[in-house]
Amino acid sequence: MFNWNVGDRSDGERAMSPVIGKALESTLIILYIALITATLYGGTVPEYRATAGSEIADRTAADVVAEIQRAVPPESVDAEARTRIDLPPTIAGETYHLEIVERTLMVSHPNPNIGAAVPIVVPDRVVTIEGAWQSGGQLTIIVRSTEDGLVVRLR
Amino acid sequence: MTLDRNGQANLPAMAVALIIITTVAGVSITVVDGAFRSADREATDRAIAVATADRLVDDDSPITERSNVLAERRVTANRIADSVPESIDIRITVDGDVIYERGDPAQGTTARRLALLAERQQITLDTDFEHRTATLPRRSPRATLTIHDDSGIETVRANGRVVLHDPKGLGGSYDVSLSRYETTTLRVDTVPEEGDVTATYYPRRTQKALVEVTVDA
């Protein structure tokens, strides 16, 4: 890159040559970096973040559903159980939301490409599963028996 | 070197450097792509399949007698349908026989559970109590004894324990409960005529069965 033999001025026209050379090189490098950055952040990186995020969302949902299924106590007269579980505070750098809709756990995320839905398989004696959770802090699964059957609540 | 050639001599070197960097970046992206593809493990499919399989072989499943023992007569699509989550493609097989299928989960994830498939049989004992005793060849939680009114039998013992007694003489059909944990010998207190006593018992025949749940959500 460095061509500092400016003392060898056998010809006066050569004086500007290194300056132009450096300017040209710098411009090309800057253009190149801009191009690479634009390509990566314009397509590849968000795609990878979404792919990784949706895998994390899938696994988070699967973990929560497994914990809910495990939290259901065996048949008994009266039961109350609390399970606290740690979940990732953010997915792809943003907070997310868990919600139960018709016995299905839904993960909703600001990025529309990230999300998951896992049906919950529990015995018939569980009459209600409800609740929602915003990421950050621990998720608490509360199982309580009522006259009609077990009620599972997320908090 | 002449003046003209020397002027921008490091431009070609830079071009080569950029090409190398681009190649490395391209190769890295390909590797990352491959890593992402191989990390795609269908966590939700697996979770549903495992949960459904566990639920089916569980103690309070609609198709089991107790934990891990399927009752053959209960293994039907109707009973399974309630335990299966909706809106997914799922196939449940027991020992390779498709019991329940919805949609086409060919690309799905499979969870397998080893269980026993139990079938309750009804066998009439081939004996006339010639020596007052008869041993049930297999264990059974209960037996049905049919005793003729004129046989003169007053007491029936199972392994020494009195299970039926009537001082006026037994007659009719009786259900007796037996120990599930030891082989039972029935003993009557007189030698009956041929055909006076018949004993029916209900052993359970079990065989190992593989419960497979394939899910494609």
Image (spheres, coloured by chain):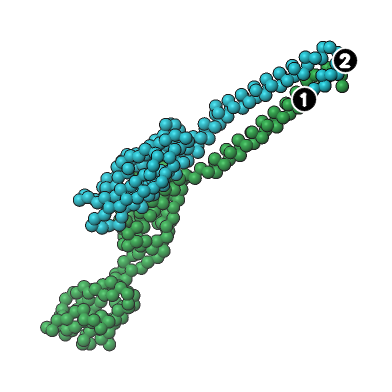
Seen at 25% across and 83% down, the residue is B160
B68 or A39, nearer to the observer: A39
Give coordinates of residue B42: x percent, y percent: 47, 44
Give coordinates of residue B68: x percent, y percent: 37, 61
Q: Earlier in the sequence, mark 1 or mark 2?
A: 1
Query: Mark 2 highlights which residue?
Result: A10
Residue furthest left in the image: B168
Residues packed near mark 1 inside 10 Å, few (<14), some (14 to 19) or many (20 plus):
few
A2 or B76, nearer to the observer: A2
Chain bearing tag 2 is: A
Q: Amino acid at mark 2?
A: Ser
Query: Mark 1 highlights which residue?
Result: A2
Can residue B121 be seen here? Answer: yes
Q: Amino acid at mark 1?
A: Phe
- Dividing the picture into quadrants, the one containing residue B20 is top right
* Chain A on-screen colour: cyan
Seen at 87% across and 22% down, the residue is B1
Residue furthest front in the image: A7
Can residue B100 be seen here? Answer: no
Seen at 79% across and 23% down, the residue is A3
Residues at discs 1 and 2 in contact (Cβ within 8 Å):
no
* Chain B on-screen colour: green
Instruction: Tell me: residue B13, above or below residue B215.
Output: above
Chain bearing tag 1 is: A
